[in-house]
Image: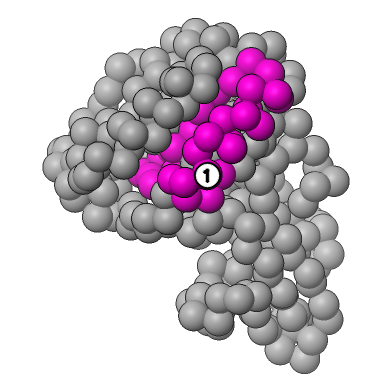
Amino acid sequence: MPNGFHRLQTLMVKLGLFDQMKILPSDNVQIDVMDHPEIAGKHNILHQTIERFQQATQTTFGLHVILQKNVPMGAGLGGGSANAARLLSYLQKTYAPHVSDEEMHELALSLGSDVPFFLLESDWAVLAGQGEEVVSVGTADTLWAVLCYPKISLHTGSMYQKLNRGLTWVGQGDKSPQSSHVQKWEEFRNVLPWVNDFEQVIDGPWLQAIKTKMHEQGSLFSQLSGSGSAVFGLFERHEDAKKACHALKDFGQVFAVSTDWGVGKW
């Protein structure tokens, strides 16, 4: 793309693993991340979110945001983007309810290509362009997955460099309708081919080892999440997902999660 971003096509699904934010009034803008002081301060995406919102809406206010990280960092799970989107929604409702959804979309995109996804009400979406083009959206029943984070942090930009694709590369086209309700994991095969190009540039045996273990535990499918390093496995039943978590505990942090993420869980 002319702006230096790669074109992509991706399926994103909201799952019930999330960070927790506490927002307090303050005389200035302060961001604290519990147990992670190295990612607090002005360089944190939450600080950037407030700063850009104030610039775009010409508002001035102070906030103290305390963040409890539960989503692993450098895992390709979108934790930071989800936090930015949630904070943006709070800021809009509190300080500038007149701001349109289109303006919020542009503001979210300025923070990160996948931030606009987390502003959507949908459970899942197929995204294109640099991640800002919504191709398809839908809802989903309660579907279970296991996330395994091998405690390896991967940088998205570095992963794109390893992939060494031209900026105008376009993969196989989207097959989905504009909106769809998904009742089982297999139905996502009608939405987008299940393939992650980043898997071909993963160094080391850990990816295949995790996928093999998930398969042994009965997963319907397993794959690298985003640019990694987390690996997800899809399961038909909660009981199977819990058993897989136990079997995978030696590989790193493991979570049994579902698409029943709920608005109240933010």
Q: Residue at x 66, y 32 (%)?
A: 242
Q: Is residue 35 above or below residue 10?
A: below
**Compared with residue 229, is residue 181 higher up or lower down, i.e. above or below?**
above
Indicate whether 237 appears above or below 226.
above
Residue 109, x across and y down, in percent:
50, 51
Chain part drawn in magenta: 225-254
Q: Is residue 85 magenta?
A: no
Residue at image mark 1:
249
Which image quadrant is residue 237 in? top right
Q: Residue at x 45, y 20 (%)?
A: 216
* Quadrant for the N terminus in the image: top left
Q: Amino acid at mark 1?
A: Lys
User: Regarding mark 1 in the picture, which secondary structure is present there?
Assistant: helix
From the viewer's perspective, is residue 124 above or below residue 100? above
Image spot of residue 257 (x, y percent): 66, 36
Residue 69, by quadrant, is bottom right
Q: On the rendered structure, is 118 left or right of 149?
A: right
For residue 166, side relative to residue 96 (left or right): left
The residue closer to the viewer here, 44 or 207, is: 207
Residue at the image point whose x is 67% and y is 51% from the top: 18
Nearer the observer, 140 or 214? 214
Question: Residue at the bottom extreme?
Answer: 27
Horizontal and vertical percent position of residue 197: 27, 31
The residue lying toward the viewer, choosing from 209 and 189, is 209
